[in-house]
Image (cartoon, rainbow, N blue to C red):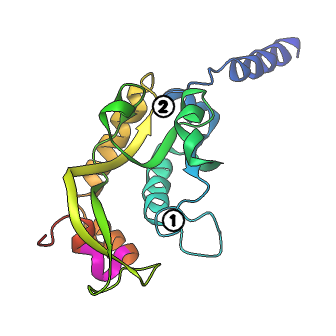
Amino acid sequence: MKARAGAGALAVLALAALPAHADLAEIKTRGSLRVLVSADEQAEMYALNPDVAPGFDREILDGFASLQRVRVETVVRPFDDIIGALLKGQGDVVVGLVDTEARRRQISFSVEVLPTRLVVLTCKPQPAIRKDAALQAGLYLGAPGRAAYAARKDAPELLRALDEYIGNLQKTGTWSRLVVKYFGNDALAVLGRAKQ
């Protein structure tokens, strides 16, 4: 009886001793993938309201978490604090972050999830873009970029597993279904395949 109680106490101590900066094995032991999301994240990317569709990134990460047999735990932070929160171990993954050289000095990025472009906004007479009828997309600035998931540099197993999962998903009909579901008529443009 004492041996069982001692083993149970050791298991609890082992769980408590897990580092805040967890890699994939520790995430599996904890049972949750902590996803850092900006407080103003767009619902079509990662919905914070449970009454709407989960969002593009959320569906991807739900699939990844299911494969790893863990649950997704959403951690909401202001955008300006999101990388700091990741580095402090308050989350395991940041969604939809644009991969830049400056950010790469601090954190690691997964393979590309979506392409990005910086766009000049101008006033009418061109057709309006969503949200503000007085604004429209204009010229592209700079080279195309990429949005990806970010993890700490000390989580290579998590990053490798994410890369493998995203790469495999992008080869399936599920990927196309998700892109069309969340981006509709803009799906080709979102994927950077439309003429520019």
- Gap between marks 1 and 2, in whole Å? 27 Å
Q: Residue furthest left?
A: 195
- What amino acid is labelled 1 in the image? Gln
Residue 30 image position (x, y, % from top left): 63, 34
- Give the side of residue 7 with respect to residue 116, left or right: right
Helix, strand or loop: magenta stretch: helix
Judge from the rendering whether residue 48 lies leftward or rightward of residue 131; answer left or right: right
The residue that mark 1 highlights is 42
Residues rendered magenta in the picture: 183-187
Image quadrant containing the N terminus? top right
How far from the left and from the top, in percent, is residue 34?
Answer: 59, 42
Question: Against 28, is 141 above or below?
Answer: below
Nearest to the observer: residue 171 or residue 104: 104
The three-letter amino acid code for the residue at tag 2 is Leu
Q: State whether residue 154 is above or below residue 170.
A: above
Q: Nearer the viewer, mark 1 or mark 2?
A: 1
Q: Quadrant of residue 137?
A: bottom left
- Between 50 and 148, the one nearer to me in the picture: 148
Circles 1 and 2, Cβ within 8 Å, touching? The answer is no
Tell me the residue that label 2 is attached to. Answer: 24
Which residue corresponds to the image point at 36% horizontal and 70% vertical from the top-left? 178
Q: Secondary structure at mark 2?
A: helix
Where residue 14 sits, quadrant-wise, is: top right
